[in-house]
Image (cartoon, rainbow, N blue to C red):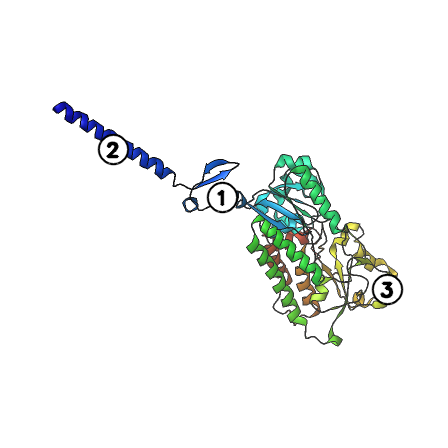
Amino acid sequence: MELNKSNKLKSNIFILMFILITALIMASGCVDKSTSNGNSVVSAPKEASGVSSADEVVESAEVTFKDGVSREVTIPRNAERFVCSGAGCLRYLIYLGAEDSIVGVDSIEKKENEIEGRPYVLANPQLKEYPLIGEFRGKDDPEKIIAIDPQIILKTETTGQPAATNAANADSLQSKTGIPVVMLPYGSLKNEQQKAEMYNSLRIMGEAVGKQERAEEVIAYIEATMQDLENRTIDIPESERKTVYVGGVSSAGAHGIVSTEPAYPPFLWVNAKNVATGMGADHADIAKEALVKWDPEYLFIDVGTIQLGNEGAIGELKNDPALKGLSAIENGKVYGVIPYNFYSTNYESVLANAYFVGKVLYPDRFEDINPEAKAHEIYTFFVGKPVFSDLNKQYNNIGFKQIPL
């Protein structure tokens, strides 16, 4: 009797186990299945991971956008290692406050210059110690770049080349290194079209290096500064606007008195009459006879001219008989401004010069401005340090001064 009960109990246990196993098998069939090439693949419920697929995980680590020459470039979303190629590229990166992410530089950054005219270098002397990526003006060495292992190569256009050529150069470098290349026009502040290029490049670089907010701050600062200069002088009657000329303008090196900029921004922003207007948009060499004929009320000299020897344009004003009759010389209205063309344009120096020019021409409109203090403020905003004094010292401290002749 006891034996029958025991056998019955065992039978019931086996039945119960069978039912449980069957239930588990049926439950497993309720899990989502998808097929790929005829094979069943179990996929986790979307709610469990918060990501729809493995592909979306990969995409979240990258971003694709158009660079400054309309190339589609895919870059790491949170990149931290960059190199800059071409004139002015590193300057923009430092404007954006990303100097700690630089891992290599071109040859000009490692060169010891007797006179260093780039504020961003004065503020970042450590750049000379960084690994070399190639020669300056965008002559890159792909093997050196690969060895440094940056995540993104930022590259400014070569001046004078068509956009298609610059784009092809970027594609070639990207192909040789396997590293994404972001190509950018440098732009300028001389007209609205070039200004739009400059701002667009700052925004694209800001997106590439994770400094979008800083890019907008830089653009807003430039706009506010230009507007302040304009507001101070816009209502000066045409008949009371001063006639001016800037000579000795640096352009790929130092130059003499005939070297000028017909669209010199500091003159434009304070509504002065540039006597060389109409000679083109960029750098121009005029005839000395034209300068004598124009006879401007004020002469401004780019103090980078002293690198020529014999004081450059200053020496010409002192010693050339053809120039001695200029009204500005006779009236003591010759002043030094800081050179800003050095491996492309140093915009902080352009803005600082504008306040000095405004103070000289219209002192009542700039009564609240100390040009040197304003320069320190501007340099600090752009490159992180008040380097005006260090910069001016290299030019014998004749910037922002009346030049005795």
Q: In which quarter of the image is residue 107?
A: top right
Q: Give the mark nearer the N terminus: 2 vs 3.
A: 2
Q: Name the residue under label 2.
A: 16
**First in sequence: mark 1 vs mark 2:** 2
Q: Which mark, by number, is residue 290?
A: 3
Give the alpha-carbon distance from disc 2 to disc 3, as whole Å.
111 Å
Mark in front: 2 vs 3 = 2
Q: Which residue is drawn at 60% across and 61% down?
A: 221
Q: Mark 1 points at which residue?
A: 53
> Which amino acid type is marked by label 2?
Leu
Establish if 62 lies above or below 382. above
Residue neighbourhood size for the residue with mark 1, other residues' Cα within 10 Å, grouped as few (<14), some (14–19), many (≥20): few
Q: Earlier in the sequence, mark 3 or mark 1?
A: 1
Marks 1 and 2, Cα distance to the nearest angstrom? 40 Å
In the visual, does 21 lie left or right of 268? Answer: left
Question: Can residue 163 be seen from the camera position used here?
Answer: yes
User: Could you say where residue 136 lies in the image, as x and y percent from the top left?
Assistant: 72, 43
User: Depth check: 203 or 188 in front?
Assistant: 203
Residue drawn 61% across the image and 64% down it: 224
Give the class, few, some or many, for how many residues have Cα within 10 Å of label 2's Cα (few <14, many ≥20): few
Kindly state the secondary structure of the residue where label 3 is placed: helix
Quadrant into which the C terminus falls: bottom right
- x and y, in percent, of residue 164 in the image: 74, 49
Marks 2 and 3 in Cβ contact (< 8 Å): no
Callout 2 secondary element? helix
Q: Which of 172 and 308 is in front in this view?
A: 172
Residue 61's spot in the image, x, y percent?
53, 44
